[in-house]
Image (tube, rainbow, N blue to C red):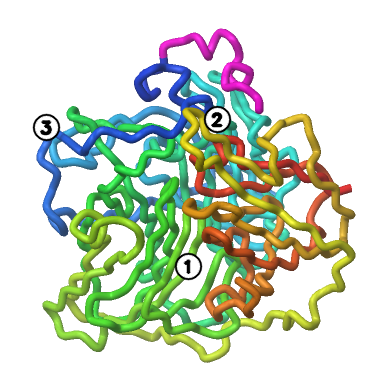
Amino acid sequence: MISRRRVLGGTLAAAAVPFLAPGGARAHAAEPPRRAAPHRTRAAAPGAFALAMPVPPVLRPTSSTGGVDYYEVTVRRATAEILPGIATRVLTYDGHFPGPVIRARSGRRLLVRHHNDLDRPVAVHLHGASAPPECDGNPMDVFAPGTSRTYVYPNRQPHASLWFHDHAHHLEAEHVYRGLSGTYLLTDEVEERLPLPRGRYDVPVTIRDARFDEQGQLAYALGDRNRTTILANGKVTPYFEVAARKYRFRLLNGANLRTFSLSLSDGTPLLQVASDGGLLERPVALPVLTLSPGERADVVIDFSRHPIGTRLVLGNTGPGLPEQTGQVLRFDVTHTADDPSSVPRVLRTLPPVTALPTPTVTRDIVLAMDEDGRPEPRGLINGRTYEPGRIDTTVGFGTSEIWNVTNANTRAPHNFHLHLVQFRVLERGGRPPAPAEAGLKDTVRVMPGETVRLHITFDGYRGDYVYHCHMLDHSAMGMMANFRVR
């Protein structure tokens, strides 16, 4: 596996970088997962629902000419008041924590020029996008401190709630943990024709976890299981004031490792209308919505059934102690508002799985991580760690394939993200997928001993891309591979 020193270059690897975990360069992929210290912070952590949840700002293009929107973004350090009264150092896009929102339209080109104002290389990956290889944000295709890179997004795909984040290999896990992620909302006529909630009632929400040191700074250690402070849009277990009407919440699991299982405290199901690759065919009422890292789900919540003064908690029954990780966000119904929105019974039309293109190849992809207690456990795909110069899989442009993705571990969960394409889940554990997974996906959870069966069509671009576990600490340990479309 490529060393972190080769990623950074000799000079940068030796430099003192204030955001690294203790131990400098060894704190990244070469460092084995280790048990982190208990959560102790001199600054008093706020009680649950003491802080208001912000809505991330929407970036405006610097210009729009000839059917192309141009953006300028600076990757830089900033501070954020995550804990009251504490300036926590973070890494940001344009100083925003969490990252900003870019709104785009299918068929309209969008260019983003990123300026790297950090002292380490970065690569920007638009997660879920069909992008040409030079604009995909390949883990090795980084741009250096003091330089810029322009990413061109043709947006040749349907609507979807996408997100962008750093992908510099061996650095991606810590960079995303410290704040380098943002939201990219792609729309089209199919979505715009629907009377779903929009405007101020269409709210992106990034959910993640964190651990703070005694000075109130974000503490990072690879494989840290003590990230037990839950953040929603960068605030600790906040509240959000809502009107007694319907809202669309664009939920993103932005954590490195944690899977969330979300539900409302009054037992009302969450009405899921979209997954990674856009709208489902029909809305799905879910008592519990489960999202692994990198997965997205758009849900509609109708607060009109509740009187003013109602407080509803979005809880989490995923891994972790309920007293630490069991509450995510509270909705406070504070006022009334007109509501012309509705959720149609049919949202879009997707081809049935029986009508998908005939696959030409079936492949077996095995995800694994050392569980034998060795000091430097590896992340593996088909028994090998990531090597940038090795092409692990070659596929034909325009062809379709079946990939059987298996988690070979007995304890560690994984998930699977494939760059360039949206896929369809055919089976989970030998059974048809649940309705919430029946739409277009780019990230799918794979529990210990489980196999998911995917149908993938490679009709976007020719070139080299990666697939990996999107539990980013695992991909930083080598659970990643290259594929070539030719």
Which residue type does callout 3 highlight? Arg
Horizontal side, residue 379 vs residue 387: left or right:
left
Residue 109: x and y, percent?
68, 52
Tell me, yes or no, whether the two marked residues, 1 and 2, touch with CB atoms within 8 Å.
no
Quadrant in the rendering for residue 159: bottom right
Write the residue at 75% across / 57% down: 364
Write the residue at 21% across / 54% down: 324
Figure check: 77 above or below 84: above
Q: Secondary structure at mark 3?
A: loop
Which residue type does callout 2 highlight? His
The one nearer the camera, 394 or 374, is 374
Quadrant in the rendering for residue 422: bottom right
User: Gap in Å between the C-alphas at discs 1 and 3?
Assistant: 36 Å
The residue where tag 2 is placed is 170
Figure check: 2 above or below 109: above
Local crowd size for mark 3, using a 10 Å CA cut-off: few (<14), some (14–19), many (≥20) = few
The dot on residue 42 is: 3
Write the residue at 41% across / 49% down: 255
Q: Secondary structure at mark 1?
A: strand
User: Gap in Å between the C-alphas at discs 1 and 2?
Assistant: 28 Å
User: Gap in Å between the C-alphas at discs 3 and 2?
Assistant: 30 Å
Which residue type does callout 1 highlight? Ala
- Residues shaded magenta: 1-16
Local crowd size for mark 2, using a 10 Å CA cut-off: few (<14), some (14–19), many (≥20) = many
The residue where tag 1 is placed is 297
- Asked if one can make out residue 67 in the rendered structure from this viewpoint, the answer is no
Residue 271: x and y, percent?
42, 80
Q: Nearer the viewer, mark 1 or mark 3?
A: 3
